[in-house]
Amino acid sequence: MVLKIGVIGTGAIGRDHIWRIASNLSGGQITAVTDVNREAAEAAAQSFGLNASVYADDHSLLAEGDVDAVLVTSWGPAHEGSVLAAIEAGKYVFCEKPLATTAEGCRRIVDAEIRHGKRLVQVGFMRRYDSGYVQLKQAIDERLIGEPLMIRCAHRNPESSPTYTTDMAITDTLIHEIDVLRWLIADDYKSVQVSYPRKTRHALSHMRDPQVVMIETQGGVLITAEIFVNCRYGYDIQCEVIGEDGIVKLPEPSSISFRKEATYGTRILMDWKDRFIEAYDREIQDFIDSVGRGMLQGPTAWDGYVAAVTADACVKAQESGEREEIVFDTKPALYEERTLSQA
Ligand code: NAI
Ligand code: ISE
């Protein structure tokens, strides 16, 4: 059976997911699209020979479109409304991060899903599908390094856009580490503190960049995460877990090495789209397959909620300079079962 999919938001990642469903993946067909930018929606509807229907907004797409599921790939502030409307319509929904821009918004989605009585929502935390992180998790679960004690990571982007602000380093960027690290070590967060080193001359005047976030987990693991969104040299994701008996490190993306002009080197990717291309393929394929089986197994709305609560505490710590507590509601029973990529 082919899953009929509607896309809400046909910007960069919306078009990227449309391309992968049309070209790389199996079992899915884009039948409907919408975007507040009608021209963008119309162009996407005709891309890759799709001939999908264009709708004025998410509500009309959900009500009139021939869709079994939707991808929410619009701007973050629009996610909550579209996800709630999809749940209301009883449709499966894949939502790009952030699930909602506030913890309260994520909680409303969790509550709507609980009222529906079944998981309908998968959040786009694609790193859980990256083969490097999967290998790290396997090594930790097999106790290769004993108990994890510390994690050191870095999230570096070559440059940030003029609309990017200091808090977005948390809500837009670090949010990936916030999700993948708790999944990696099966632990939750307890507190956070943020420090700023000297500012790079490449950052715009309204921004602090880089920054260092220190998170303590409930199990006592200390995470140090550097976020540097104007590093210039490349898109670079680093993660190293230091345990009682050894260290495991995220592999570098595979690439040829070269010898030229007295240099031995290798290229560094510049774009998130390329760095995690296989992970995006796997997460969307998993969504299509799981909907087909009637049971989602990817990152949950609860994971979206936990990430938002943690991000809120990180932003508070950015502002206060103090150590801030991270406090979650009790995990609802709907999210208790442990599946493939759930924490
Ligand atoms: P973008 O700005 O390129 O595209 C967003 C699109 O959504 C635009 O075409 C805009 O017109 C449309 N839009 C806004 N409000 C809408 C609404 N109410 N209904 C329908 N369409 C609406 O942004 P981009 O980079 O594609 O990001 C979209 C989302 O994906 C963001 O939440 C972002 O954080 C997330 N993202 C995730 C990545 C990942 O690594 N998982 C990578 C890049 C983005
Ligand atoms: C972007 O929205 C993403 O999700 C990328 O994965 C991240 O590296 C980047 O910093 C964000 O702006």
Image: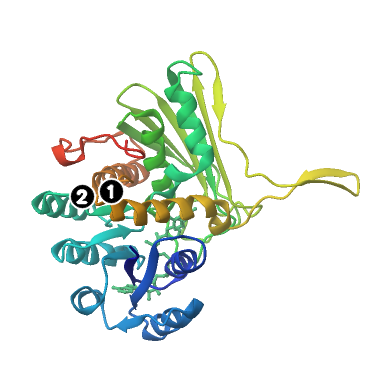
Find residue 32 and report its image quarter.
Answer: bottom left
20 to 232, vertically: above or below? below
The three-letter code of the residue at mark 1 reads Leu
Question: Based on the displayed image, in which of its 4 quarters is residue 95 positioned?
Answer: bottom left
Percent position (x, y) of residue 92?
25, 59
In the picture, the disc for residue 296 is 1
Residue 245's place in the image compared with 109, above or below, is: above
256 relative to 65 in the view: left or right: right
Q: Are marks 2 and 1 in contact (CB under 8 Å)?
A: yes
**Percent position of residue 278, x then y:** 53, 51
Which of the marked residues, 2 or 1, is nearer the chain's N terminus?
2
Residue 259 x %, y %: 86, 45
Going by the numbered disc 2, the residue's amino acid type is Arg
In the figure, 215 relative to 234: above or below? above
Residue at horizontal 43 percent and vertical 72 percent from the top: 11
- Say what secondary structure mark 2 lies in: loop
Please give the label number shown on residue 119.
2
Answer with the quarter of the image where residue 257 lies.
top right
Which x, y percent locates residue 258?
Answer: 82, 47
Q: Residue at x 15, y 52 (%)?
A: 113
